[in-house]
Amino acid sequence: MPILFFLSALVAGFANPFQSGANAELNKHLNQPVLTGLFVYTSGLAGLLLTQFFLRRALPAPSTLAAIPPWAWLGGLISLIPTLIGLTVAQRMGSAVFTGASITAALVTSVLLDQFGLVGFRQHSASPARIAGCALMIAGLWLIARF
């Protein structure tokens, strides 16, 4: 795995608690999770459009778009779930517990997706070491939430 990929994943992980906190703070002032989500996604869309403008990447051909499996278009819709949950409970739970629970659930789900090669991922067996890693994450989350 190229080191740049790993570092990029770390940056995404570092950004996650800041995103949750900023979104939850916005919701605290607006007190309307759906409207807050609309503002969050509007600012994200503006950022993506600006990035596209500077990168000047060509748009995909219609044949490329037509070949994409229908379920692959659901990522944005699915992202509403963690966004709305983060808006409403992150500050109540605290950053460590909320982020720990989110990451632990994501890791366990990821091991299952890898095990069965679902949603486009290559198959990677749920080895005893991977299962132990998940168990350690669950134990770590319990420690963070408990103490």
Image: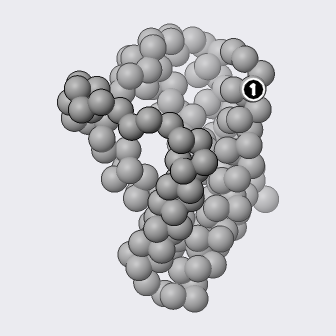
Residue 78 in the image: x percent, y percent?
37, 50
142 shown above or below 136 = below
Q: Position of residue 124 (x, y in %)?
A: 50, 12
Q: Amino acid at mark 1?
A: Leu
Which residue is depicted at the point 51% across and 63% down? 46
Residue 38 can be seen, yes or no? yes
Q: Position of residue 108 (x, y in %)?
A: 53, 33
* Closer to the camera in the image, 33 or 76: 76
On the image, numbered disc 1 is attached to which residue? 4
Q: Is residue 43 left or right of residue 145?
A: left
Between 18 and 104, the one nearer to me in the picture: 18
Tell me which corner region of the image, top left, top right, bottom left or bottom right, holds residue 55.
top right
Camera-side residue of 106 and 15: 15
* Figure label count: 1
* Res 19 → quadrant: bottom right
In this rendered view, identify the residue nearer to me: 132 or 50.
50
